[in-house]
Image: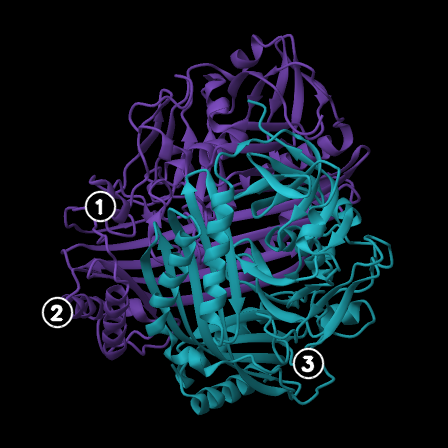
């Protein structure tokens, strides 16, 4: 166990096993009067290879390690993080966390939900650890992608090409004074691409990202390069062909998996976060229109809409089996056949609501408090094929991807600007491209308009932002390759 | 935290090893930071972060890399720098690095960056926050949420070009958001470096948030269309500050700035001046020198409405045959990577001569927007974007704040909005909050003909 503390080749913490050190902190906090105390150790290695137009822009490898301490005392919560992994420093930090909790002087004491104590470990299945691959090889992998882009398209087609490769590994150990101990090994590979295309109809910019809980083997697959080339081809087509169009009447709209995924995330995942619903994110990420409904009974969409947040999907970008409070993860059915069904809870929000946590608590690193977060949020696929969805549309739009998007802080009024969008006529997708169509819809209006989903499924890697200080956490946004909405009036200025 | 002398010794040692085969910068920071988060008018959590970190930049034959060493010791430094050097040598040269600042000047001071009262502040902080929440409630708030940060940092910097400097700093920033009901809210912000008037400034933020929330009650669905907008400094900092912050050659290189190829062009009214000022009194981005040891300065971005300059570090200045503006910063980019690139310090807009009441005087359809969030682009190259007003938003009628309205979106272009600036208020405020990363000094602003959109169903 002591090798766990070896950062590169030095062994400054060998004097005490890390298990003993964390356990000592928990016991010390318990003895100091904390009603609840947890220590969460995280060793986080991040590596990045970033290129612009075929030349290296920046690369780096950073390792951090530390312990986040959360204490509940006198009805308040204190949080302290320390990078000094020594007994005295941890005692001081524990004491400070308890003192900060006590100084909050709350009138309504905070409580955590009761959860069973577990002692377990879990890990991401990795075939080739990132550490086993030379940095030259990693950089070269990105350069080859850019070279392929340059060779596939005219050099002037993409005047700006930025490719960002990110590799992350985390080793975590969590322990609290209720007997829970969870050890985890995580590995996540992802890339993001920013392309600016210059076409005959103007410029078009697009960012897209993919990722997987895996090792280097994920980047060795040919799909890595192929998907980037495919996306680039779409951007070029838009820049060359898309024309602004106006529609006097509502039209049928089919959105692809990328758009379906962001809708699932923004219009359903965020409003279902219990801390928002209880007001705890009021200052920053905001509250939720789910404050105004009865979860479990209120319809928020058509029966064709089921939205699930599931951390347990193997190899997914938001994969975990136990959350950062040591609670077992499971799929959460946020909307079930159109009914708001379940919130995303951590132990704090569940304690306030008088329910059990559903394992949604996540923290980005040792120096951040765990809070309710999404993992992999998707609209459940239906039983039609994509072609069947298109076949009975007389006139409409297929919106495969998006550029600009935003949503109000109650998560009700959303906007998605289309990137790759084509007209559907008489049951077929035509070659007519629409420039930047706008879906500007309320969450309810959007989900009520859905009448069918296709069988296909695809995911996009995203970094979900929330809280202050910010916690950008990896998630998948995903869905069927076709979600059909009937009679949508496109937005924007007329 | 590591003692000052010990930290100095470690920086010397790190620089010696890191620059053995090329150039290097080493910055040491001792940080003690606190945050109090509030919701439903009570403290949810009180946090503390305390750490010592060495931030190291190494350049060997045009190849560059960075690392951070937390809780450093001499033994750890040897290992980490060895690792970094090996990593950097495995890379290829980057065009982004053209050499460190060579023109070394002795460090100068910027007054009032540090208030030693910050050391005893943590024990008083909960009471100060409670006073602000009480002020919000007195102004009509039923519940208040907030985020209050305060910190002290001791900075030491050395470069392989011979620069050596140090300074302490303290900052605080609070954002309070009051609610009368879930759809009637208001926001107040207070930021600064000295604690002299902290109770007063924070209480004012609470009062302002409560007042806006109270005025916002019974808001109606706004009607889409073109309006003149009165932007609260919070909104003006987010939108116009975003454009000023894109006067950056780094963003030009990535196709992420609408200001590319616009140097010398008239973009705004004659009366409009915008600077980057790294020595702005009370500015949260102020410092005596930048990450390369270059003295900070006041640099013109927009002069009399024309784009006059960009922010530079030594490398981008060399690329464009000019001088560094003292804007070199260490910026996170992707995972595990930090860039040594130009970035704004404090963005400062010129003030106008209009009072708030005078800004409201108009016969045109006008909306007053007090806060916004979620600014996203259709194209950063073009500057086309939208953002969502939140908290109180009001129709202006007969020169006065009238009917509260809701659920509209600002959907425009940054260049067009700058060109349409009609008037500036005479009382600038410093804005720095969740949605505004770069401290921005800006007054109320009036902009004409801004498209506002709404959900279609």
Residue contact between numbered discs 3 and 1, judged by CB atoms under 8 Å: no
From what the image shows, is residue B452 above or below residue B296?
Answer: above
Name the residue rendered at 37%, 79% in the picture.
Answer: B120
Residue visible at 66% across and 27% down in the picture: A437
Q: In which image quadrant can residue B199 be found?
A: bottom left
Q: Look at the numbered disc 3 and give the secondary structure of its residue.
A: loop
Tag 1 subunit: A
Q: Identify the mark at residue A351; answer none if there is no mark.
A: 1
Kindly identify which residue carries mark 2. Answer: A31
Q: Which mark is residue B295?
A: 3
Bin the neighbour count of mark 3 within 10 Å (Cα to Cα): few under 14, some 14-19, many 20 and up. many
Name the secondary structure under disc 1: helix
Q: CA distance from mark 2 to mark 3?
A: 51 Å
Kindly indicate which chain is depicted in cyan in the rendered structure: B
Depth order, front residue of A179/A213: A179
A455, above or below B331, in the image:
above
Whether callout 2 and callout 1 share a subunit is answered yes
């Amino acid at each position: 166990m002591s090798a766990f503390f070896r950062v590169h080749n030095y062994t400054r913490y060998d004097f005490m096993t890390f298990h003993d050190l964390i356990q000592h902190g928990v016991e010390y906090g318990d003895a100091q009067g904390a009603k609840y105390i947890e220590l969460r150790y995280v060793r986080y290695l991040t590596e990045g290879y970033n290129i612009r137009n075929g030349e290296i822009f920046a690369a780096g490898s950073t390792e951090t390690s530390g312990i986040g301490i959360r204490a509940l005392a006198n009805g308040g919560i204190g949080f302290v993080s320390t990078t000094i992994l020594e007994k005295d420093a941890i005692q001081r930090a524990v004491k400070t966390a308890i003192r900060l909790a006590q100084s909050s002087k709350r009138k309504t004491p905070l409580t955590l939900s009761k959860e069973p104590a577990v002692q377990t470990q879990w890990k991401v299945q990795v075939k080739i650890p990132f550490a086993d691959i030379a940095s030259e090889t990693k950089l070269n992998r990105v350069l080859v992608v850019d070279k392929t882009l340059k060779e596939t398209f005219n050099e002037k087609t993409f005047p700006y090409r930025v490719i960002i490769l990110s590799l992350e590994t985390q080793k975590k150990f969590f322990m609290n004074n209720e007997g829970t101990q969870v050890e985890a090994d995580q590995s996540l590979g992802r890339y993001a691409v920013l392309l600016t295309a210059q076409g005959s109809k103007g410029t078009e910019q697009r960012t897209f990202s993919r990722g997987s809980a895996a090792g280097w083997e994920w980047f060795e697959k040919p799909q890595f390069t192929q998907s980037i080339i495919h996306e680039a081809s779409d951007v070029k087509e838009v820049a060359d062909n898309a024309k602004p169009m106006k529609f006097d009447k509502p039209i049928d709209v089919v959105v692809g998996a990328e758009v379906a995924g962001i809708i699932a995330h923004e219009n359903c995942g965020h409003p279902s976060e219990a801390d928002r619903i209880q007001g705890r994110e009021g200052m920053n990420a905001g509250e939720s229109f789910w404050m105004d409904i009865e979860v479990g009974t209120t319809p928020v969409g058509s029966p064709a809409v089921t939205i699930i947040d599931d951390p347990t999907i193997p190899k997914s970008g938001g994969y975990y089996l136990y959350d950062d409070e040591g609670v077992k993860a499971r799929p959460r059915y946020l909307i079930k056949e159109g009914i708001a069904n379940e919130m995303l809870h951590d132990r704090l929000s569940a304690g306030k609501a008088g329910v059990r946590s559903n394992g949604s608590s996540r923290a980005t690193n040792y120096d951040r408090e765990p809070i309710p977060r999404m993992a992999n949020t998707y609209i459940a696929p239906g039983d039609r094929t994509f072609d069947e969805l298109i076949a009975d549309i007389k006139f409409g739009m297929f919106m495969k991807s998006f550029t600009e998007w935003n949503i109000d802080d109650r998560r009700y009024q959303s906007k998605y600007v289309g990137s790759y969008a084509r007209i559907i006529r008489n049951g077929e997708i035509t070659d007519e491209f629409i420039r930047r169509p706008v879906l500007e819809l309320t969450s309810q209006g959007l989900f009520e308009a859905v009448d069918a989903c296709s069988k296909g499924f695809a995911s996009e890697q995203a970094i979900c932002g929330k809280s202050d200080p910010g916690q950008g956490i990896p998630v998948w946004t995903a869905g069927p390759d076709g979600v059909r909405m009937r009679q949508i009036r496109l937005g924007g200025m007329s | 935290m590591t003692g000052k002398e010990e930290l100095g010794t470690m920086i010397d040692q790190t620089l010696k090893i890191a620059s053995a085969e090329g150039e290097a910068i080493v910055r040491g920071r001792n940080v003690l930071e606190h945050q109090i988060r509030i919701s439903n008018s009570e403290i949810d959590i009180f946090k503390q972060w305390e750490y010592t970190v060495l931030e190291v930049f190494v350049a060997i034959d045009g190849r560059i890399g960075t690392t951070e060493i937390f809780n450093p010791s001499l033994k750890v430094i040897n290992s980490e720098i060895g690792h970094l050097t090996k990593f950097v040598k495995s890379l290829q040269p980057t065009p982004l690095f053209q050499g460190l600042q060579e023109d070394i000047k002795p460090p100068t001071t910027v007054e009032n960056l540090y208030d030693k009262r910050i050391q005893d502040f943590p024990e008083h902080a909960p009471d100060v926050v409670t006073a602000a929440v009480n002020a919000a409630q007195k102004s009509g708030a039923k519940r208040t949420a907030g985020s209050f940060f305060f910190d002290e940092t001791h900075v030491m910097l050395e470069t392989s070009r011979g620069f050596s400097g140090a300074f302490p700093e303290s900052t605080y920033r609070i954002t309070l958001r009051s609610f009368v009901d879930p759809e009637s809210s208001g926001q107040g912000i207070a930021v600064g470096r000295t604690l002299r008037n902290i109770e007063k400034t924070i209480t004012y933020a609470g009062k302002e948030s409560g007042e806006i929330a109270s005025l916002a009650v019974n808001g109606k669905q706004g009607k889409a269309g073109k309006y003149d907008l009165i932007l609260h400094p919070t909104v003006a900092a987010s939108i116009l500050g975003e454009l000023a912050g894109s006067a950056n050659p780094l963003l030009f290189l990535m196709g992420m700035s609408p200001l590319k190829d616009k140097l010398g062009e008239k973009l705004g009214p004659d009366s409009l001046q915008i600077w980057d000022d790294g020595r702005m009194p009370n500015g949260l981005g102020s410092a005596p020198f930048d990450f390369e040891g270059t003295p900070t300065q006041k640099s013109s971005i927009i002069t009399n409405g024309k784009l006059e300059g960009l922010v530079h570090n030594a490398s981008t200045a060399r690329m464009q045959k000019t001088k560094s503006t003292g804007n070199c910063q260490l910026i996170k980019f992707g995972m595990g990577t930090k860039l040594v690139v130009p970035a704004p310090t404090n963005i400062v807009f010129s003030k106008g001569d209009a009072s708030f009441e005078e800004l409201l005087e108009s016969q045109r359809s006008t909306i007053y927007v007090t806060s916004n969030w979620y600014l996203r682009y259709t194209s950063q190259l073009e500057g086309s974007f939208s953002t969502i007003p939140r908290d109180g938003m009001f129709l202006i009628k007969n020169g006065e704040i009238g009917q509260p309205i809701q659920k509209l979106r600002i959907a425009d272009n940054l260049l067009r909005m700058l060109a349409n600036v009609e008037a500036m208020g005479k009382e600038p405020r410093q804005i720095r909050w969740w949605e505004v990363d770069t401290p921005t000094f800006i007054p109320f602003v009036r902009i004409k003909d801004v498209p506002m959109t709404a959900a279609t169903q």
